[in-house]
Image (tube, rainbow, N blue to C red):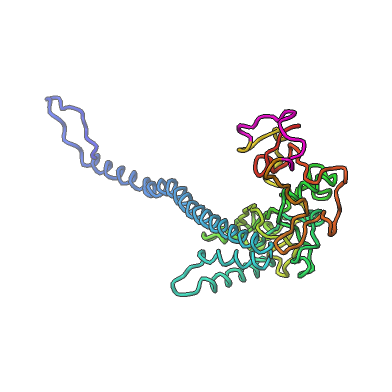
Amino acid sequence: MRLIDHLLHPGGHLRRPLPVATTMAGRLVQKRKTRQRGTSLIEFSIVAVPILLIGLGSVEIAQWFYVKQAVSIALLQAARAGITQHAKPQVMETAFEHALQPLYASPGHSSADRLQRALARRAQLTGGPAWQMEILNPTPAAFHDFADARLGLSRETGLTAINNNYQAEQDQRYRAQGRIQGLGPRSGLSIYQANVLALRVTYLHEPVLPGMKALMRQLSKQTGSYADQAMARGGYLPISQELELTMQSHPVDWPALGNQKIIRQQAYESIQGTSAPPSPCHGLWCLDMKPFSAGSLPADPASLPGTSLPETGNPADSVGNPLPGGETGGASPDPGIDDLAVTPDDPACGVTLCCVDG
């Protein structure tokens, strides 16, 4: 751009630009170009840095969700092994770590070896176990309330065990013995809740981005919990998952493992909460049920043709041992109370029994 003298000549012609003015215009343009150097770089940095951080954060979040899903599957596998193997800690530990191997798959090395090396490194950095699983239920109080010393498994191991068989009949007997709604005096749980395996696992996720471990150390809280210590010492991000499954075998109060990978909690509160009082009759069996009236049933059911009364003896478990409260031992119910009396608030109403008022 050149500075042009736009003043007209008295004759009407344009004046020719002066050489001095042209030189000054060139110097002015050169100064303006020098002042604008680096402007594009600054603008790019303002926009690119946040986009780069968001992209890196997305990679870290995606990796975290992937590991969380794998930990959830591993916890499910550990719980499945536990409910079928009497909640044995060694069985659950093996099943959990075996299910974590897909996280360390490699074409050149064994995934099991890579997993063990990673767990050993985390244990060395944190000063504790590489992961920790808590047995939330059954609690020690539940074992005290519902222990059955006549189980063959209890006699073989010398440990306390809860009977998993005939839970509805057990609940009826506990109610007949005077327990309010069949709940244990120490645990506050029913026989159904005592036969639920509840687990909580805390897995240490190693951040993939550089500098994230240092950030985790700065954000950690100075408490004595396992998760906070792992963040403060190793910079790992804890992933916590919980799961409840119904036991398919007799729960046993096994001793804790020496490596502290699986520990037992002293108290437990079911995630299902406390339900409202049930209706007098509910469930599929009560859809078309009509109340019984006087004279609708014979006074003696045995007088009906082809009718035989069932045996009222105490049922036996899978190893042939009678349940608690039978004639062979244990506390006996009040003679004035029917041994098989069912109240409308019985948990089996609508499931295996049809219950009505009256």
Q: Quadrant of residue 98?
A: bottom right
For the C terminus, the image quarter is: top right
Q: Position of residue 152 (x, y in %)?
A: 75, 66
276, 224: nearer the viewer:
276
Residue 144 in the image: state x and y as whole percent.
82, 56
> Which residue occupies the foreground of this view, 326 or 145?
326
- Viewer-proximal residue, 274 or 121? 274
- Residue under the point 12% across and 28% down: 13
Work out whether 356 lies above or below 329.
Answer: above
Specify the principal SS of the magenta part.
loop
Q: Position of residue 47 (x, y in %)?
A: 43, 46
> Which contiguous range is marked in magenta?
286-303
Give the mark count.
Answer: 0
Is residue 282 visible to the viewer in this orientation of the structure?
Answer: yes
Q: Is residue 295 magenta?
A: yes
Q: Quadrant of residue 262?
A: bottom right
Q: Is residue 358 above or below residue 336?
A: above
Residue 93, relative to residue 311: is it above or below? below
Residue 207, quarter of picture: bottom right
